[in-house]
Image (cartoon, helix red, strand yellow):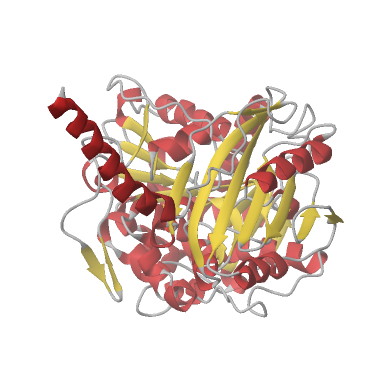
Amino acid sequence: MSSEKGTNRRDFLKTAAVGAAILGADCKGMMAKAVENSGKAKVVLATDDALREQGANPEEQRVQKLLDKAIQAYGGNSVDVWKRIVHPGEKVSIKVNTIAGPALSTHVSLVLAICERLQQAGIKPGDIIVWDRTNHELEKAGYTIATDPNRVRCFGTDMAGYGYEEQPETYGVVTANLSKILTRNCDVMINLPLLKDHEIAGVTLAMKNMYGVVEKPYKLHGGNCNPYIADLNMLAPIKQKMRITILDGMTGLYNGGPSFHPEYTWPHNGLLVSQDRVALDRTGEQIIARKRAEKGLKTVAEAGRPATYISTAADAQHRLGIDDSKQISLVEV
Amino acid sequence: MKQHCWSIAGAVLLAALVLPGVGCKKKSVDPFPASDIVAGWQKSGETRTFKAEDLWQYIDGDSERYMKAGVVTTSTTDYKYKGSVDATVDVYTMSQAEGAKAIFEADPVADAKAASLGDAARLYGQSLIFRKGQYLVRVVAFTPAPGLGDALVALGHAVEGNL
């Protein structure tokens, strides 16, 4: 993986062209092709060491600046990038991750910052839904359930009138009933996962966050979630609607996941951005691996839970993105 | 009057027949202390209980290792400490004490302090875990606070007393 603190001019021109190619395309179903054409997958890691200067929680204004910094590094002017990702009239869903409670969920401040930029890009507030599995988990994580159709809405799949599709979708070994929020109520999904160790899959990042869109995720845990995670991400509504992943890595969990264990968390103070979910997962896995090594822990593979699903997602059958570190251009800002 | 007496006698007889059966049922224990039983701690959430097969609804991804260790039920509720620190208490009831021990011993012990609770306990900066017989208890605070360690232990003792 090539890693840069900032980018030199040549790399910038190269990645900017790639970014333009990716973002300029009609995003529906175009990502895999765009990545293949570019050769390298771009992942941005934006960090801010002063994110928590005023206390334990990241400061709202600094989170907004961190998001803008990440998006700019990804493709140029922040609002212009958003205009290429989403288009006025589209219904945008923001899939957060709230299963682990208030201290280890997608930060509300990040979601607010994204909602602001989406509206600047021409998305009506009523066309934005922030969602996860249940209202209870969202509320516990600090979100306010909101259903006014003229404002940004926020609720779980268990909200009355939504629920899961009666007819399952199938790919490979996966047969799953998907949330109607995904299938019927959005054109675009923005994926906001976390940076977490996982007891079964090794890590839970961009692709594993899609377990929160299916009715019975526990059925997809065999074999270290492999090939379940890759197959799940091949289901058309997931594959086609996920336009970008902005991983909330402001707090990381290097062991004991996916539940919150404060003793195994660290303030990573960063965001990972990519439209290549596989490249993002490979990058996140390596961040967690470094932290585990620093703490003297076994690798997740040595602990009996290798994150093999990442390579599966990149194989010839799936082609969801790039898992080879040498083919990932990591831009650190 | 005579009919009334027979009604009373019938009710007594019915109670005599039914109540011993009720008494034989295992007492359902709510292990969570009410607000202010422990200084500074307010119970802020409903108690939710999950059967083993439904545990994924609470801790999907983590539930398998508890099931492997023989979890029967899991009860959880929320507390607030001094009005500002949110915390969750989970009580896992396993089929055997060995199950609670297996989960307890699976986690790395680095940075943990020993605490005097149950059969064994570990205290971290923001969390406490202990086991007592077939019970495994985890108390987790979501933000740090001065004196939190002692407060976690005090709440843990109150839970332990209810098991």
The location of residue A219, given as percent across then percent down, is 36, 67
The location of residue B50, given as percent across then percent down, is 43, 52
Position above or below: A302 against A137: below
Q: Quadrant of residue A36?
A: bottom left
Position above or below: B76 against A313: above
Judge left or right: residue A257 versus residue B17.
right
| A213 or A123, nearer to the observer | A213
Q: Quadrant of residue B104?
A: bottom right
For the N terminus of chain B, which image quadrant?
Answer: top left
The location of residue A229, given as percent across then percent down, is 41, 67
The location of residue A279, given as percent across then percent down, is 53, 64
**Count of all numbered marks drawn on residues in the image:** 0
- Residue A201 seen in the current view: no
| B160 or A183, nearer to the observer | B160
Which residue is found at the position 57% from the left and 30% from the top? A109
Which residue is found at the position 49% from the left and 51% from the top? A19
Judge left or right: residue A228 versus residue A205.
left
Query: Residue placed farthest to the left in the image?
Result: B3
- Residue A163 seen in the current view: yes
Q: Quadrant of residue A210?
A: bottom left
| B108 or B39, nearer to the observer | B39
Which residue is found at the position 73% from the left and 40% from the top? A48
| A18 or A299, nearer to the observer | A299
Which residue is found at the position 45% from the left and 77% from the top? A312
